[in-house]
Image (cartoon, rainbow, N blue to C red):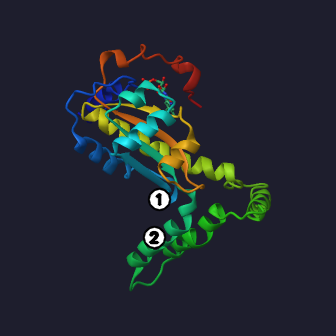
Amino acid sequence: MYNQIFENIIQKRRSVRIYDTNAPFDESVVKRALDRAVLSPNSSNMQLWEFYWVKSKETKEALEMACMGQSAAKTANQLVVFVTRQDKWKERVQWNLANLNKQFAGKELTKKDKRALEYYQKLMPLVYRNDPFGLNTILRNIIVFFMGFNKPFLRISNHADQRVMCHKSCALAAQTFMLSLAAEGYDTCPMEGFDSNLVKKILKLPAAAEINMIVACGIGTPEGIYSERLRVPNEEVIFEV
Ligand SMILES: Cc1cc2nc3c(=O)[nH]c(=O)nc-3n(C[C@H](O)[C@H](O)[C@H](O)COP(=O)(O)O)c2cc1C
């Protein structure tokens, strides 16, 4: 039963670049999609993401310009900006630890409980901590080299690795968001064609925040689908190993 519903949602979601701004637009659809987006899987449940639901006309117009006038942005009923917040790692560590401590309150800690606590007390700081001189990256490189010399070990050392980690989770949230809109008969277009410096300035984001993507939302017009949905043959990308 769910299989056919899911198939329909996947087939419905297309990148739509022209929207009918006169069509009735129910904001609660976007609200529900955002509520579902936060339930997306994310690395270590650190939730290093933020979602900016653009409500003000001025901000939308400024973002249209930052999206270099793309028609998806210009004609969209609404825009949602998906942002990574690697800089919030300490807050999220504390949040996860507080949850664990609540869960473990009044009980004798098992080995598994202690491992869960250590995960956030030791591993997360090792993975996310940075400093202006790159000393943490050097330390991680040394650890990765020795620990991973002859056994499997997490290969996360530099800022690029950390950024990839944050963007992966954020993009999954964007996908949940888009599928949710599709499930309710709405259209979307994910966009990475924007001036990220400008978007950060418009949203008053700190330097460490990064724009993952901007999603245009609305009721698409038939002309908003620019082409047939083409993909390279499955044999080129799906491998049974
Ligand atoms: C990360 C990402 C960035 C994208 N950026 C843009 C964009 O800036 N402008 C645009 O019109 N489409 C953009 N797209 C949409 C893709 O072109 C589209 O997903 C692809 O052609 C496949 O078509 P479909 O989404 O209709 O299946 C983007 C898609 C993704 C996933």
| Foreground tag (1 vs 2) | 2
Q: Residue 202 appears at what percent x and percent y?
A: 48, 47
The numbered dot on residue 45 is: 1
Indicate the amino acid at tag 1.
Asn
- What's the amino acid at mark 2? Trp
Location of the N terminus by quadrant is top left
Q: Is mark 1 within 8 Å of ligand 1?
A: no
Residue sitting at x 63%, y 61%: 128
Look at the picture and state if 124 lies above or below 68: below
* Chain-order first, disc 1 or disc 2: 1
Kind of element beneath mark 2:
helix
- In this picture, residue 72 sits left or right of residue 93: left
Whether residue 134 is visible, yes or no, is yes
Q: CA distance from mark 1 to mark 2?
A: 10 Å
The residue depicted at 68 percent of the width and 63 percent of the height is 130
| Residue indicated by mark 2 | 95
Q: Is mark 2 within 8 Å of ligand 1?
A: no
